Amino acid sequence: METRYRLNIFKSNRYISAQIIDFENKSIVLGNPEKNEPKKPHTSDVAAYATSFAKKLIANDIKFLRYDNKYRYHGQVKKFIEILRENKINI
């Protein structure tokens, strides 16, 4: 069975960022540097960010994720997760 990683999304009024956490090994597997995060995120910016994040997930052979329910599944968070699902990431 493959390791299930957790998707942690941080959202504020100015930024949105995501990282992948492996709770078994207690480490951060993948995160984007701050310079790639959209400032004042709109849905189009979030879509571009999610697409680049999905490409990094595929490159690291991560296909199964669980979403940490820190924020409601609504708006920018929903758009981010939908883009990941469109890129064949199972959440």
Image (cartoon, helix red, strand yellow):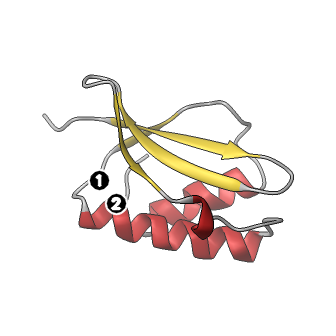
Residue at 72% of width from left, 36% of height from top? Answer: 71
- Pick whichever, 72 or 6, lies toward us: 6
As drawn, which residue projects farthest toward the left? 1
Q: Which residue position holds label 2?
A: 57
Residue at 83% of width from left, 57% of height from top? Answer: 14
The percent position of residue 29, horizontal first and vertical second, equals 33, 44
The percent position of residue 61, horizontal first and vertical second, equals 21, 58
Residue at 22% of width from left, 35% of height from top? Answer: 3
Q: Which residue position holds label 1?
A: 63
Residue at 32% of width from left, 46% of height from top? Answer: 64
Q: Secondary structure at mark 2?
A: helix
The answer to whether the residue labelled 2 contacts the one labelled 1, judged by CB atoms less than 8 Å apart, is yes
Please state the total of marks drawn on the protein image: 2
The percent position of residue 63, horizontal first and vertical second, equals 29, 53
Pointer 2 local density, CA inside 10 Å: few below 14, some 14–19, many at least 20: many
Q: Amino acid at mark 1?
A: Lys
Left-right relation of 81 to 5: right
Q: Amino acid at mark 2?
A: Leu
Q: Earlier in the sequence, mark 2 or mark 1?
A: 2
The percent position of residue 9, horizontal first and vertical second, equals 60, 44
Left-right relation of 34 to 30: right
